[in-house]
Amino acid sequence: MKFMDLEVETLDAMLPGVREALQEHPLSVLESRESPGIGIFKQSPGPGLLVQREFGGLGATPLEAVRVQRAIGMLSPSLAVGTTMHHFSMASIVQLGEASTGFEWLLLEAVATDRLIVASGFAEGRAGTSIFDPTVSATRVDRGYRISGTKRPCSLSRSMDLLTTSIAVEPEPGAEQVMAVALIPADAEGMRVEPFWNSWALAGAESDAVVMTDVEVEDELVAVSSVGFGKELDLMSQYALQWFSLLISASYLGAVSRLVQMVLEYERPLESEKARLTIEVEGASMILEGLARSMMAGEQEGSGLTRALTGRFAIQQALQRTTALATELLGGVAFVSAPDVACVAASVHALALHPPHRIAATPTIVAHAEGKNAHVL
Ligand SMILES: Cc1cc2nc3c(=O)[nH]c(=O)nc-3n(C[C@H](O)[C@H](O)[C@H](O)COP(=O)(O)OP(=O)(O)OC[C@H]3O[C@@H](n4cnc5c(N)ncnc54)[C@H](O)[C@@H]3O)c2cc1C
């Protein structure tokens, strides 16, 4: 098997036709605001990738999911990043369903069978604040909540059918404020999308702003969490963040793999340089697959999230080195004669921008290295 064969085979087996449909378009189109990528994903069984088979999904294991995501990242970094946000929402709902009355299962089935796109709004475009500290407010109304605020950037914003979003629930007098996660139909009254993403890099992920004005949501669409405001993360959030760390790393690993493949197919670079590049990128892949296998072995509790974060930051550093080396080996003519090298090289750095920030994760990583157990991001 040659470089990337395993990932491409997994993509073809799980989402037949997606690769061919994406390959009909140049990278510059797939990475633009007009990208057909999310539409192609929506027509495939992709929305149900993480949904269990009994509910009509593909029930992908973490190992299968990271391989699919890496292959998609190689074809379109924007699509991989955007769909990671969908899968993050789905992983959270799957986990909620473990302790549920049945509503979550109906939702999972609807997503898989009707191929719904579920965006994920946690960031609010305020530098220096935790994603677990939302300002989007929710006040109690009869049998539900009234929600107002803005989520940005919010990938998949123009294609979403549903949005999962963190909210701060106004406390009863004398009680503490709590964070909750709401599921809101994209066409609910009071929902609108505004331009926000003003960069050409990753523009195909549709990461604009979602504005909510007095949006009313029923009780059963809101899950109150013990997370947030400096508290220890609960197991559901740890599990969902573990999935996110794996899938977002796989997405950018795929993007860099495109550059590596270009180098491997180019006869001019020395064998030793090709080997150095392969060691970097396949080493990162081995970290990723090791984390996926450990999730499958049920090691996600306890130190699972810290291991996933540590692995993600190791991959992040490896991808920065790989991108610089691959760009150098491809040379100036490749850089200036087509937009692909610059496009991928610029996009890859965005892995460092996804939460949690490396600096925000530092206390958790150091605490674990010292034998303490803490997950506060
Ligand atoms: C392509 C893309 C798509 C995205 N899509 C979504 C989406 O769909 N939904 C979503 O919710 N989010 C999404 N995000 C994530 C969201 O963009 C980030 O939460 C946001 O980028 C964080 O903004 P920031 O980097 O300016 O802020 P910060 O993370 O606050 O970083 C700003 C600066 O603060 C410093 N810093 C950070 N934390 C600490 C700390 N604890 N102590 C000291 N210094 C610190 C960092 O060095 C950094 O320089 C997406 C991001 C990207 C790149």
Image (tube, helix red, strand yellow):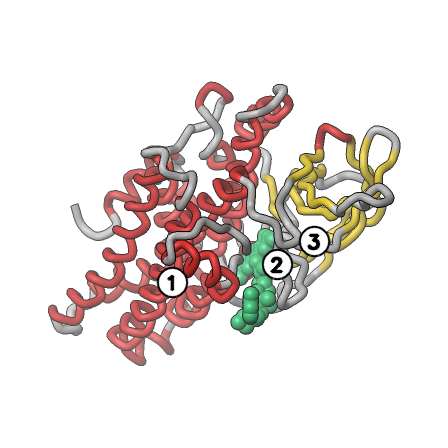
Callout 1 amino acid:
Gln
Among the 4 quarters of the image, the one containing residue 219: top right
Residue placed most toward the observer, 169 or 275: 169
Q: Residue at x 45, y 61 (%)?
A: 351
- The kind of secondary structure element at disc 1 is helix
Cα gap from disc 3 to disc 1, whole angstroms: 26 Å
Cα gap from disc 1 to disc 2, whole angstroms: 20 Å
Callout 3 amino acid:
Pro
Whether residue 24 is visible, yes or no, is no
Choose mark 3 or mark 1, whichever is in front.
3
Callout 2 amino acid:
Ser
Are dots 3 and 2 in contact, CB under 8 Å?
no
Residue 370: horizontal and vertical position, in percent?
38, 57
Cα gap from disc 3 to disc 2, whole angstroms: 8 Å
Q: Residue at x 34, y 64 (%)?
A: 319
Number of the label disc, if any, that sits on residue 134: 3
Q: Residue furthest left?
A: 271
- The kind of secondary structure element at disc 2 is loop
- The kind of secondary structure element at disc 3 is loop
Residue 127: horizontal and vertical position, in percent?
63, 68
Q: Is residue 256 left or right of residue 165?
A: left
Is 130 placed above or below 156 here? Answer: below
Mark 2 Cβ inside 8 Å of ligand 1: yes
Is 353 placed above or below 121 here? Answer: below
Query: Label 1, on which residue?
Result: 316
Mark 3 vs 1, N-terminal side? 3
Residue 251: horizontal and vertical position, in percent?
41, 53
**Picture quarter with the C terminus:** bottom right
Mark 1 vs 2, N-terminal side? 2
Query: Label 2, on which residue?
Result: 130
Q: Residue at x 39, y 33 (%)?
A: 60
Mark 1 Cβ inside 8 Å of ligand 1: no
